[in-house]
Amino acid sequence: MIKFMPEPRLLDSPRGRDWPRPLVVPSPPTGVPLPARANALIVGAGPAGLAVASALWHLGVRDVVLVDRDGRPCHRFFDRIDRLGQRVLRSPYEHHPGVEGYRDCELLDFARMHWSLLTRDERGEIRMAQSGHRSVVPVDVFDAYCRHVAGVHGVTEQTWQATVTGIRPDRDGVVVATDRGMIDARFVVLCQGEERRQAPDGWRGGYWDEPVPAAARSIVVVGAGLSSAHIIANALTSGRHVHWVVRETEERYQCADVNASFFRPEGRAKFDAGSWADRLTLMDRHRRASVMFEFQPFLRAAEVDGRLTVHRGHPVAEAWTGAVRLANGDTVIGDHVVFALGTTPSIGTGLLPAEIVASRDGWPDLDERTLAYRADPRVFAVGAAACMVLGPAARNIDGHRVATARVAATIAARSGILAPTRLLAEAGAFV
Ligand SMILES: Cc1cc2nc3c(=O)[nH]c(=O)nc-3n(C[C@H](O)[C@H](O)[C@H](O)COP(=O)(O)OP(=O)(O)OC[C@H]3O[C@@H](n4cnc5c(N)ncnc54)[C@H](O)[C@@H]3O)c2cc1C
């Protein structure tokens, strides 16, 4: 069997190109009070919130308010990506927050429309996508596309900068408390994404989403995922020595972070058929950290020439500023330690009453069909919080679309906008 090995040059792609702007450039509402009420309030304007708001727009639900800490669609997503210096996405062209089934301009269409702005490699990847092969999407294209989706569906003007501090469903609706006032909503969709996973108490060091101090000549990176790979590549490129601590006996290289079958109906059906315990096992097996294949030749070469030292097979037992002690007793020393331990899904804890989240093994209790919290069907979750219903792909861009189809159809139906059966049948088409 021939093993296809994508080349490291595919990881490179220009950032910050001047994409053609729409005739009217939308801007977020600033300096004005938050609206007092909304039919649907979306907490978080990341790719998941963007997908939900755009789908609601297509279904005719226009009284929508998005509340986001940063106040701009997808700001945290691109901020994290840019901090890592990540230039291409791991997910392919068919994964995007645009609305499926509504003749929208999809990500691949968008990229083709801007052919003249693309590099030779980027055009080659579009040809790969067109012929059904795995392809690599430039962050710059995805960023411009998200701005396009937010612009054409009126999402930018509906996104308010505020932090949601509490959600209290009552008899008449759902009261959403923010640091800038209260909003009464009929429906609330939680699209909070994930927070970085914290190191155990007492460990000292920096995190993957923080800058590495300029004075550090050598760093110790703890973690085996794509963020680690970017931090390592950046450090090597700037002439630093890197110690890479990988708990497993070998690092894993994979195209996507989730097995591709989980993006397809048959993969989800496999997940659906399992008991709670089976689902937990699948989540555990399929959410393990991995690095895009393109990194492999570069990291292997750095290890061979001694710029990178990989410590495999031993977890970290303790970490101080500039050093970690491994479970086998070895001490690994550098000028700075970086924890890249992944992320933990936000499931509504701290915002919703605990009896509504009804957390089990760290996952909320959601209705499988509608993704509403079973204890209050006016509140929904899209994104990583929906993993125990939709499988490991729920936290990825494509998983948001599956969740969105169910949630948006349910909200539109309950808002009396279209006949429920037709809407749910439409949602069923994507399930
Ligand atoms: C570096 C990196 C690269 C990734 N690459 C890919 C990829 O290539 N493909 C892929 O499918 N996935 C990728 N992912 C996974 C990725 O996180 C998700 O696909 C995507 O960001 C999730 O979107 P989201 O809207 O659920 O979360 P986010 O993008 O995190 O958005 C959630 C938003 O909610 C806001 N928020 C949370 N709580 C509150 C509150 N209480 N009040 C107000 N606002 C709040 C946050 O500030 C944030 O703006 C990547 C993740 C990282 C970190």
Image (spheres, grey):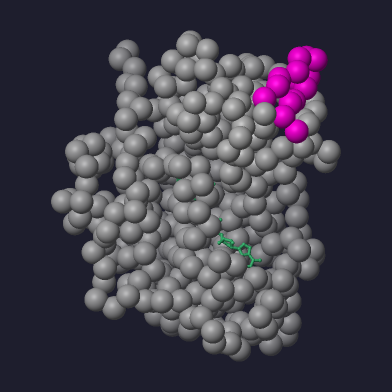
Q: Residue furthest front?
A: 215
Residue lying at 60% horizontally and 67% vertically, measured from the top left: 69
State how many labels appear. 0
**Furthest residue in direction left, as rendered:** 116
Q: Is residue 132 above or below residue 409?
A: above
The image shows residue 76 at horizontal and vertical percentages of 53, 57
Q: Is residue 46 magenta?
A: no
Measured along the vertical axis of the image, is residue 121 above or below residue 303? below
**Above or below, comparing residue 18 to residue 419 in the picture:** above
- Of residue 382 and residue 197, the one placed in the foreground of this image is 197
Ligand 1 occupies quarter: bottom right
The quadrant the N terminus occupies is top left
Q: Position of residue 249 (x, y in %)?
A: 62, 16
- Quadrant hosting residue 223: top right
Assign the C terminus to one quadrant of the image. bottom left
- Residue 125, x across and y down, in percent: 25, 38
Visible residue check, residue 371:
no
x 22%, y 47%: residue: 118
Q: Where's residue 278, x and y in %?
A: 65, 37
What's the residue at 25%, 41% (across, down)? Answer: 122
* Quadrant of the image occupied by residue 185: bottom right
Residue lying at the far top in this picture: please name it. 304
Residue situated furthest right in the rendering: 202
Q: Is residue 420 left or right of residue 70?
A: left
**Residue 166 makes an appearance in the image:** yes
Confirm whether the magenta stretch covers residue 322: yes
- Residue positioned 74% across, 60% down in the render: 349
The region drawn magenta spans 321-334
